[in-house]
Amino acid sequence: MTDTAFNSRKNPATTFTEWLREQHQENWDAAINHRFIDELFAGSVATDVLQHYLVQDYQFIDRFVALLGAAIASADRFESRVRLARFTAMITSDENTYFLRAFDELGLPAKHRNAPQLTPQTKAFQDLMTEAAQSQVYPLCLSVLTVAEWLYLSWADRPDAQLPPRFIHAEWITLHNNPAFADFIGWLRSELDRTGAALDAEGQARSADMFGRAVKLERDFFDHVYTPLQYS
Ligand SMILES: Cc1ncc(C[n+]2csc(CCO)c2C)c(N)n1
């Protein structure tokens, strides 16, 4: 739902990604200030809640990588493909073993790591990533990728907060607030600013719709971890 078209925004200095976020500010703020994030920083997330969050979130990566592939294929220039390809290589390498170590720490059996029962919220997210990928429209792929990354940087960016003592909490924060991650999101936003501003009004409305659905799903995902499934 678009209140005002991007081209008739009040402040001409507003970038396309700022315009997108402004339209979905309520869900955005609810997500980045969610109870789950407060508990993560406090190191006090209940074990069954954290298990549920990580098991369901681990099912995110497959479609996320497929969406990156679609962005690489639909990008309008070589340097963009290269940057996306480097990021894809980074997140698919073995460097980051956080999930596997966390599953060990939480005593989660293999069946829940690899083929858990999926919740409707997880499925809805997978479907939105598939929809964006299948559009084969670069700024639409970016609209969903940008939410999944920028919203995570936004909740993790609490400069005055102390890190909690256990790695299962602390590393989930530092994975999302480190300088390399922030730098990539800066680039991702500049890319959507550039290609989104060049869309016609209908394309911009489609981008805003997908961006808004992604923000809502991020909020729903945090909400839904408080009615965890049992993984034993
Ligand atoms: C529901 C949900 N939304 C966004 C992310 C963030 N995220 C997903 S893939 C990726 C790139 C590599 O880490 C990032 C930052 C998440 N984990 N779970």
Image (spheres, rainbow, N blue to C red):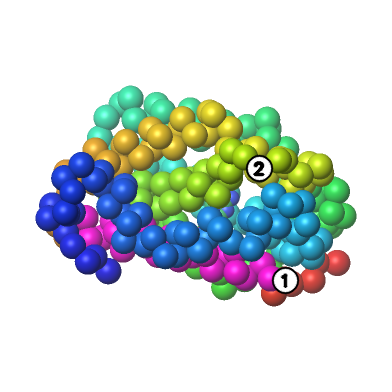
Quadrant location of the C terminus in the rendered image: bottom right
Q: Nearer the viewer, residue 163 or 88?
A: 163
Q: Residues within 10 Å of mark 1 (few under 14, many from 20)?
A: some
Q: Is residue 204 left or right of residue 212?
A: left
In the rendering, which numbered label is found on residue 81? none
Q: Which kind of residue does numbered mark 1 sit on?
A: Pro
Q: Disc 1 on helix, strand or loop?
A: loop
- Residue hosting label 2: 161
Q: Is residue 36 left or right of residue 84?
A: right
Cβ–Cβ below 8 Å for labels 1 and 2?
no
In the rendering, which numbered label is found on residue 228? 1
Q: Nearer the viewer, residue 159 or 53?
A: 159
Q: Which kind of residue does numbered mark 2 sit on?
A: Ala
Q: Earlier in the sequence, mark 1 or mark 2?
A: 2
The answer to whether 190 is drawn above or below residue 35 in the figure is: above
- Residue found at x 81% / y 44%: 166
Q: Give the label, 1 or 2, closer to the camera.
A: 2
Main secondary structure along the magenta-highlighted residues = helix
In the figure, residue 39 lies in which quadrant?
bottom right
What range is drawn magenta here? 203-226
